[in-house]
Image: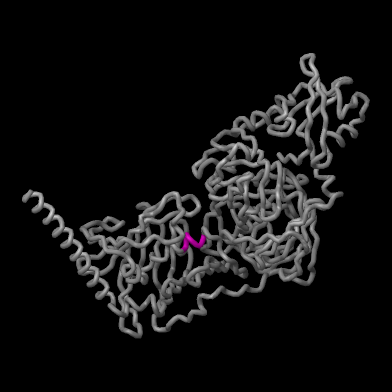
């Protein structure tokens, strides 16, 4: 018993000694860097200018100005001529990208808040709100020896519902002179829920004057993610003399949009092919070129060859990686004097150029001409636009034009994407969806949990096998992977309800498939198959959409049917193919069935137009009594017409 007590006593003493040593070295480190003057930086505020070289960025990937005051934070980034401002008033965040200032989706807010303590300025603040765990000899992320002091930080509110949580431990490294030389912590990726280990290493020292005395700050910051060096920040200027006004952290005003108002409103026709919208554009007077109209594209992105052909100016040192559903591709910034969609024009904008030919878009052609890329946010957001699928037109108006009457749907901005919350099924399961006119299919996010009551389901292999039967032996590509396909009985967007919605579902963030829809993303896609039955008005300045359902005459052209493809075989009418999970498929109609009665009448003498109007191009909700003959027996089915989108 005595020996056990002695061991316990030694361990308690040893732990206390370690804690005392860590606390002493921590206090000495704060004193070394300026004491009260250092502690006051975050309270009074400080402005820091950095040059940043990333792993992909060449000599200087970006120039960044960071304003910090207490827990408020504002960041300005200049990348080529592209300016990005992200800010917080302490609670709500927003982003200003070029001329547009928008509120940030909750996921983006959380991601930015989780990086608040990555700056040297914030160290005294986070050490004051945390609990000291202890200290030990260790190594910096770059391998050099240092003394590591560990502080447990409180769990932020925005982490409470994460499936995996970072440990919220801040490891502060000091050298033999008790100077702070690095930090290490865990950080969560709010798109994938992946937790990474972030290391920060400081090099060089600089004395910075403040009203309370000098503060010694690091000149160079090297950042590591999971042991890999990803970026270097070099501090080029610092202002700690001027106390930052709270007004600096208010939402920035919108800038002047680059749209030319003189010709507006303008109505521009589009081609709808494979559930994608294609419009013609002119670049610096050259064109026309076909391009995909894509609200899901964060930036307009055009092929290298068109950059040269149109004589566009490539901005030096502006290389970056364009990330999209097709993957990530080397790109660069391009200055355009004039970009016209019909007579709707924007001037003096910066867009992206790159290897579009490496993506599936590079294989697209319209009227024998190849598609040059994607028309994205910086162009579309300059206007109020209305996409009319019945007319196949897009109307461009000034951003401050009156909005039409209809169902108003507010949205958030997730990066440069329109983000909405939808619900699925009778249980109203919430899902986060990006509204994407470039998405030819609907995609449910990994967070969705399927309920049998929501509707039938198939694996991706079953789905494409059934689709392949439609081509009857012709060459057809089959896809594989851990995706599923659903016919959802009910989805809601605010007060709007959509029935019989076909959607892919990526089962996890790590789904693998030959399909481009299987790449890593946290969100789903609300695509053209849902939007095409409405007129949808987008206003990025007001952060709202207006949805107007098609008129009765327009809905008559929506091609509602029963999921039956048929053929004439002599005098007989034969079911050639049944769409998977359609009303007919679920009722039991099969390919090869002979149709003998339609609503009690023989179709033997019907014209092709009569058959098309009754079976293929009818109105939603119209009932059908179908009698077929199979293996000498007659079977009767009662079906209801729906819009089936492939």
The quarter holding residue 316 reads bottom right
Does the magenta portion include 212? no
| Number of numbered discs overlaid on the protein picture | 0
Picture quarter containing residue 616? top right
Q: Residue visible at 93% across and 25% down?
A: 605
Residue closest to the far left: 2
Residue 195 is situated, as x and y percent measured from the top left of the image, at 41, 51
Which region of the structure is painted magenta?
108-112
The answer to whether residue 291 is visible is no
- Relative to residue 579, is residue 116 depicted above or below? below
Question: Residue 466 or 229: which is nearer the viewer?
Answer: 466
How far across and how far down the image is residue 444, in percent? 60, 45
Residue 319 left/right relative to 294: left
Residue at x 83% of width, y 52% of height: 551
* Residue situated furthest front in the rendering: 1
Coloring applied to the structure: one colour
Magenta stretch: helix, strand or loop mostly = helix
User: Where's the C terminus, which quadrant?
Assistant: top right
């Amino acid at each position: 018993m005595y020996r056990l007590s002695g061991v316990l006593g030694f361990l308690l003493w040893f732990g206390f000694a370690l804690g005392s040593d860590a606390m002493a070295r921590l206090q000495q480190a704060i004193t070394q860097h300026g004491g009260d003057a250092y502690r006051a930086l975050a309270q009074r505020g400080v402005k820091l200018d950095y040059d940043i070289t990333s792993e992909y960025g060449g000599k200087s990937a970006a120039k960044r100005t960071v304003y910090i005051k207490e827990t408020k934070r504002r960041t300005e980034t200049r990348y080529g001529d592209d300016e990005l401002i992200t800010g917080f008033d302490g609670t709500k965040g927003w982003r200003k990208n070029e001329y547009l200032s928008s509120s940030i989706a909750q996921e983006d807010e959380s991601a930015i808040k989780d990086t608040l303590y990555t700056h040297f300025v914030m160290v005294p603040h986070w050490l004051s709100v945390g609990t000291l765990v202890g200290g030990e000899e260790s190594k910096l992320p770059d391998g050099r020896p240092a003394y590591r002091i560990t502080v447990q930080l409180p769990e932020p509110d925005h982490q409470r519902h994460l499936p995996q949580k970072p440990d919220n431990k801040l490891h502060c490294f000091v050298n033999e002179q008790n100077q702070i030389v690095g930090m290490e912590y865990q950080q969560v990726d709010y798109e994938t829920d992946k937790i990474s280990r972030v290391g920060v290493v400081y090099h060089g020292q600089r004395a910075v004057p403040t009203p309370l005395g000098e503060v010694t700050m690091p000149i160079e910051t090297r950042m590591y993610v999971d042991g890999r060096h990803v970026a270097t920040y070099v501090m080029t200027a610092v202002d700690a003399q001027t106390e930052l006004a709270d007004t600096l952290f208010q939402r920035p005003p919108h800038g002047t949009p680059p749209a030319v108002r003189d010709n507006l409103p303008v109505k521009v026709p589009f081609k709808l092919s494979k559930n994608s919208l294609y419009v013609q554009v002119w670049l610096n007077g050259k064109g026309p070129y076909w391009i995909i109209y894509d609200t899901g594209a964060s930036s307009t992105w055009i092929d290298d060859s068109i950059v040269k052909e149109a004589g566009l100016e490539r901005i030096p040192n502006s290389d970056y990686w364009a990330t999209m559903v097709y993957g990530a591709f080397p790109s660069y910034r391009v200055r355009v004097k004039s970009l016209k969609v019909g007579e709707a024009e924007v001037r003096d904008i910066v867009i992206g150029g790159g290897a579009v030919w490496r993506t599936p878009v590079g294989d697209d052609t319209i009227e024998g001409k190849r598609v040059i890329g994607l028309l994205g946010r910086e162009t579309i957001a300059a206007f109020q636009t209305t996409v009319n699928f019945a007319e196949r037109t897009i109307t461009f108006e000034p951003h401050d034009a009156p909005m039409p009457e209809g169902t108003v749907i507010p949205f958030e901005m997730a990066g440069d994407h329109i983000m909405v919350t939808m619900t699925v099924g009778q249980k109203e399961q919430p899902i986060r969806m990006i509204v994407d006119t470039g998405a030819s299919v609907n995609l449910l996010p990994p967070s969705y949990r399927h309920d049998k009551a929501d509707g039938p389901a198939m694996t991706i292999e079953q789905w494409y096998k059934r689709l392949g039967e439609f081509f009857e032996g012709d060459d057809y590509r089959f896809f594989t992977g851990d995706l599923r396909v659903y016919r959802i009985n009910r989805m809601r967007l605010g007060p709007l309800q959509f029935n019989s919605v076909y959607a892919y579902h990526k089962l996890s963030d790590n789904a693998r498939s030959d399909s481009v829809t299987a790449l890593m993303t946290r969100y789903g896609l609300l695509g053209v198959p849902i939007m095409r039955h409405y007129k949808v008005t987008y206003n990025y300045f007001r952060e709202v959409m207006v949805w107007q359902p098609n008129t009765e005459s327009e809905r008559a052209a929506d091609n509602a049917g029963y999921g039956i493809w048929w053929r004439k075989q002599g005098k007989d009418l034969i079911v050639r193919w049944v769409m998977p999970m359609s009303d007919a498929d679920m009722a039991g109609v099969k390919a090869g069935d002979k149709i003998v009665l339609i609503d009690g009448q023989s179709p033997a003498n019907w014209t092709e137009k009569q058959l098309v109007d009754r079976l293929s191009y009818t109105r939603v909700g119209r009932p059908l009594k179908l009698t077929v003959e199979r293996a000498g027996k007659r079977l009767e089915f009662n079906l209801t017409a729906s819009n089936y989108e492939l």
